[in-house]
Image (tube, rainbow, N blue to C red):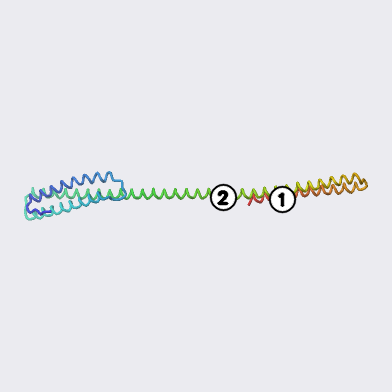
Amino acid sequence: MEVPTSWDALRKQARKLEAQLDEQMNLYRKLVSANVSTKADAAESDLESWIDRLLKQLQQVNSQMQALVSTGGSEVVSHTLNRHQEILQDLTQEFFRLRKSLRAKQEHASLLEDFKEFDRTRLDLEEGSEQHALLKEHASISRSTGQMDNVISQAQATLGTLVLQRSTFGGINSKLSNVSSRLPTVNTILLAIKRKKSMDTLILSLVASVCTFLIVIYWLTK
C-alpha cells in the first residue's frame, strides 16, 4: 500500500479502508449467522484473513494521522482523527466478537457430531449384544431340546424292553397253563410260580417307570 504524506490523503485512505471493511464485515456477519459446520472452510479463512489485513492497514493509517496531528493541528482535525479511531476500534471489537462466536458455534457443532457418533456406536454395540444374547439363548434351547430327545429315546427303549419282557412272560404263562391243565397235581405249584412272576413283572415295571421319571427330572433341572 502506498504511504500518503498529507492529511487529506491519509483521511481519504482511511475512508476507503473503512468502506472496504464495512463490506467485508457484512459478508462475515452473514457467514457467522449461517454457519453450522464443524470446522472452518477455505472461504471463511480467506475472509477472516482479508478483514484482519484491512484492520492492520487502517491501524497504520490512523497512526500516521496521529503523527501529523501531534505536530500541530486544529480541533476539527483532532475530532476527525478521534472519529476514525473509534470506527477502527468498533470494527476491531466486532470482528473479534464475531470470530469468537463463530468458533463457539463450530465447537458446539463438533461436540454435537461427536455425541451423535458416540450414540451411533453405542446403539451398534447394544444391537450386537442383543444378537449375541439371542444366539446364546438359541444355542441353549437347542442343547436342551437335544437332551430331551435323548431322555425320550431312553424312555422309549425302556418301554420296548418292558413290552418284550411282558410278551415273553405271557408266553411262559400260556405254556404253564397248558401244563397245569394236563398235570392237576402240580397246579398249586404252578399257580404260585405264576403269581411270583406277575409280581416280578410289576416290580420291574415300577422300577423302570421310576428310573425314567428320575432321568427326565435330572435333565430338566440340569
Q: Which residue is mark 2?
A: 139
The quarter holding residue 31 reads top left
Residue at the (39%, 49%) spot, across then down: 117
| 23 horizontally vs 175: left or right | left
Q: Which residue is mark 1?
A: 211
Give the SS element for disc 1. Answer: helix
Residue 4, percent from left and from top: 9, 53
Q: Amino acid at mark 2?
A: Ala
Residue 85, percent from left and from top: 15, 50
Q: Amino acid at mark 1?
A: Cys
Front one among 150 and 115: 150
Q: Residue furthest right?
A: 185
Q: Residues within 10 Å of mark 1 (few under 14, many from 20)?
A: some
Q: What number is the disc on residue 190?
A: none
Give the mark nearest the N terminus, 2 or 1. 2
Give the SS element for disc 2. Answer: helix
Front one among 73 and 213: 213
Residue at the (15%, 53%) spot, across then down: 57
- The reply to whether the C-beta atoms of the residues labelled 2 and 1 are less than 8 Å apart is no
> What is the tally of numbered marks visible in this picture?
2
Residue at the (41%, 48%) spot, across then down: 120
Instruction: Measure the alpha-carbon separation of dots 2 and 1.
Output: 28 Å
Front one among 201 and 119: 201
Mark nearest the camera among 2 and 1 is 2
Q: Residues within 10 Å of mark 2 (few under 14, many from 20)?
A: few
| 56 horizontally vs 142: left or right | left
Residue 193, percent from left and from top: 86, 49
